[in-house]
Image: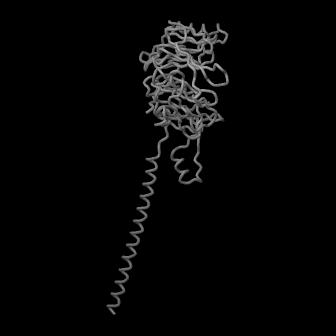
Amino acid sequence: MERVVASALGRRASVGKGQGMQQRKAWGVWVIAFAMIVGVILSVLVLTPREKRLLAGAKRIGSEDFWSASGDSSFTYFWLTERTVLVQNNESDPTTEAGVTTKFYRYDLDTHKADRLAPLSAQFLATSGEGYDMHISPDGAWILWSAGEGGVMLCRLDGTHKIHYRDKGLDGALLCWLGDSLHWTAIFTQKGGGSYDRALVYEVNSAKPVRSLNISPETPQEGGCFGNLDTGAGSDHILGDTACWTGVTRTDEIVELGLGATIAPTQRHTIQLPPNSEIESVLYSPRGDRVAWLLQTDYTMPLQAFLHRVYPRYKAPTRSVASVWVCRVDGTQMHEVGHIDLVGSDGTAPLAVASKAGPANMSISSPDDLDLHWMPDDRHLSFTLQGAVWSIATD
């Protein structure tokens, strides 16, 4: 009898130990599963790219009112050196028919002093200068503009060395400096038909063209236009992109145009743009080796985009943004510098996220409101936003 009882107790103890081991194993499995889930979540959070708010990496240079000597914020600026800026300011003037007059100032970022360039302002007014078609030489010494009364005007920033070019074809031509700051070119249509077929090359010390070139028929001109034209990396070629920027586009093409016996493409680069992009402007860096793209596009926060890929039934919200991207001329190293919300049709931004650089509700109504420029160091961009001028690194 005693042996029977002992045997039963032994079996019960063995069963209890087995159940305990099973429970510990089950708990171990749950702990491992939980740790794996936490690890996956942490990995997603760490590896998912952070949202690149334009202001988050930007540095304030100064206020717009500070830059405009008259206190009128209706102005345009051009970089001359890394520390000086040419400011084109539209000031109230009841003596003119339009009620405003254009004044130029050289602004020094170190001294915060704006020197009025009266001779340049007078010359611009006398030739009915077109403010939308002004071009500063790469060395910051010369200014070129389309004259409303016809032709093209050139002078130094101090208003000296004036030349008024009036050759046939200059009215409405595309103007572009060459990299040596001593020559500039005008591209225009001579034969008609909507495509550019002729170019004149001028030297700053001569009133007559030093070269007259045909444009090779191999030069791509989608829709009969160059989207943009600017100084290339050398004095014997220029850069242009060929899109006419109508609606969303997946690619653009940058063309390096060599100035030889004719103007002809030496390199052509197809650029892959971010999805759902509308091109607002294309800016070539001072050295002519990189390109900044100002785009209007739809943006989805990275984590929400990831969740949508994992669980397609989850609808990731999107919002409209103005986004700045930079790449090399050949399209490589494309990356986003930053973006900012566009105001919705109801007058409010779709989403406002606070940043260390500014208030939470930073938004604009149009990408062009940023007035984007390359800075002379070839590594920063500048832009204007809600009463201030900012700079941001492109790397």
Q: Residue at x 33, y 87 (%)?
A: 6
Residue 139 location (% of width, % of height): 45, 17
Q: Would residue 248 be seen by someone viewing this image from the given angle?
A: yes
Q: Would residue 74 be seen by someone viewing this image from the given angle?
A: no
Q: Does residue 125 sit above or below 39 in this rendering?
A: above
Q: Does residue 229 sit above or below 22 in this rendering?
A: above
* Residue 294 figure quarter: top right
Residue 384 location (% of width, % of height): 53, 25
* Residue 227 figure quarter: top right
Nearer to me, 371 or 188: 188
* Residue 368 figure quarter: top right
Q: Does residue 128 sit above or below 271 in this rendering?
A: above
Please identify the residue farthest to the bottom as the structure is shown.
1
For the N terminus, the quadrant is bottom left
Image mark count: 0
For the C terminus, the quadrant is top left
Nearer to me, 254 or 9: 254
Q: Residue at x 58, y 34 (%)?
A: 296
Colouring convention used in this rendered image of the protein: one colour
Left or right relative to 291: residue 7: left
Please identify the residue farthest to the front as the structure is shown.
261
Nearer to me, 359 or 393: 393
Residue 8 location (% of width, % of height): 36, 86
Residue 311 location (% of width, % of height): 55, 54
